[in-house]
């Protein structure tokens, strides 16, 4: 049986508000981000969720804790759901980094990884889901790289196409993992 995946981005961080691309840095939710995380919990608590999987970076962990901490739904952290590792560019201005992300679809950032490597991490995570969560609905809290990995794997959207798009927030993306 398939696994129903609801992908939710982590909530707004202080870095987001300051135009910083955190990458693998921990980050911290802003006041608005904490409100968004509470709204996420309100949206999903009664949505038939069997488990929540979150990136292990602090900003995603904070989102999951606020949204689901008091629900009894298990929250499981997985490093494979992290953002792309920008290496030497972790913590750099987001505008400059995003303007050149298409150049790093297959070529790693200096001392970091490529978007293709990040998507492979997400594919490895998704491949493990059916062994325990078959026939169930789960929430995945992650980053741009997490969503792109799911879009590539489960929708066949190329990383070059994804890199050329702006990231438009919405209240969740639905996927089915075979």
Image (spheres, rainbow, N blue to C red):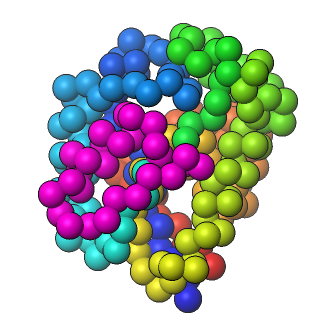
Residue 161 seen in this snapshot: no
- Coordinates of residue 127 in the picture (x, y in percent): 65, 69
Above or below for 105 versus 46: above
Q: Could you tell me which quadrant the C terminus lies in?
A: bottom right
Magenta region, residue range = 55-81
Residue 135 seen in this snapshot: yes
In this orientation, which residue lies closer to the viewer: 54 or 162? 54
Q: Residue at x 41, y 68 (%)?
A: 138
Q: Is residue 136 left or right of residue 62?
A: right
Is 172 magenta? The answer is no
**Hey, which quadrant is residue 100 in on the image?**
top right
Number of numbered discs? 0
Above or below for 12 versus 3: above
Q: Residue furthest right?
A: 107
- Coordinates of residue 56 in the picture (x, y in percent): 46, 43
- Coordinates of residue 65 in the picture (x, y in percent): 26, 47
Is 65 magenta? The answer is yes
**Hey, which quadrant is residue 18 in on the image?**
top left
Above or below for 161 versus 140: above
Q: Could you tell me which quadrant the N terminus lies in?
A: bottom right
**Hey, which quadrant is residue 12 in on the image?**
top left
- Coordinates of residue 91 in the picture (x, y in percent): 53, 15
Q: Residue at x 40, y 75 (%)?
A: 137
Q: Is residue 115 left or right of residue 166?
A: right
In this orientation, which residue lies closer to the viewer: 78 or 96? 78
Q: Residue at x 76, y 34 (%)?
A: 114
Above or below for 153 versus 66: below
Q: Is residue 177 left or right of residue 28?
A: right
Q: Is residue 46 left or right of residue 119?
A: left
């Amino acid at each position: 049986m398939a696994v129903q995946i609801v992908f939710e981005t982590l909530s707004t961080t202080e870095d987001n508000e300051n135009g910083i691309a955190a990458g693998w840095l921990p980050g911290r939710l802003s006041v608005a981000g904490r409100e968004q995380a509470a709204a996420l919990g309100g949206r999903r608590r009664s949505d038939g969720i069997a488990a929540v999987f979150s990136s292990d970076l602090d900003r995603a962990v904070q989102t999951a804790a606020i949204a689901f901490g008091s629900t009894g739904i298990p929250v499981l952290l997985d490093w494979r759901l992290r953002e792309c590792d920008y290496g030497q560019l972790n913590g750099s201005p987001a505008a400059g980094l995003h303007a050149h992300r298409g150049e790093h679809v297959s070529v790693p950032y200096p001392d970091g990884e490529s978007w293709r490597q990040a998507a492979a991490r997400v594919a490895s995570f998704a491949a493990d889901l059916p062994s325990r969560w078959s026939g169930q609905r789960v929430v995945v809290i992650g980053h741009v790289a997490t969503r792109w990995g799911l879009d590539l794997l489960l929708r066949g959207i190329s990383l070059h196409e994804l890199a050329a798009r702006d990231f438009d927030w919405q209240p969740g993306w639905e996927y089915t993992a075979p």
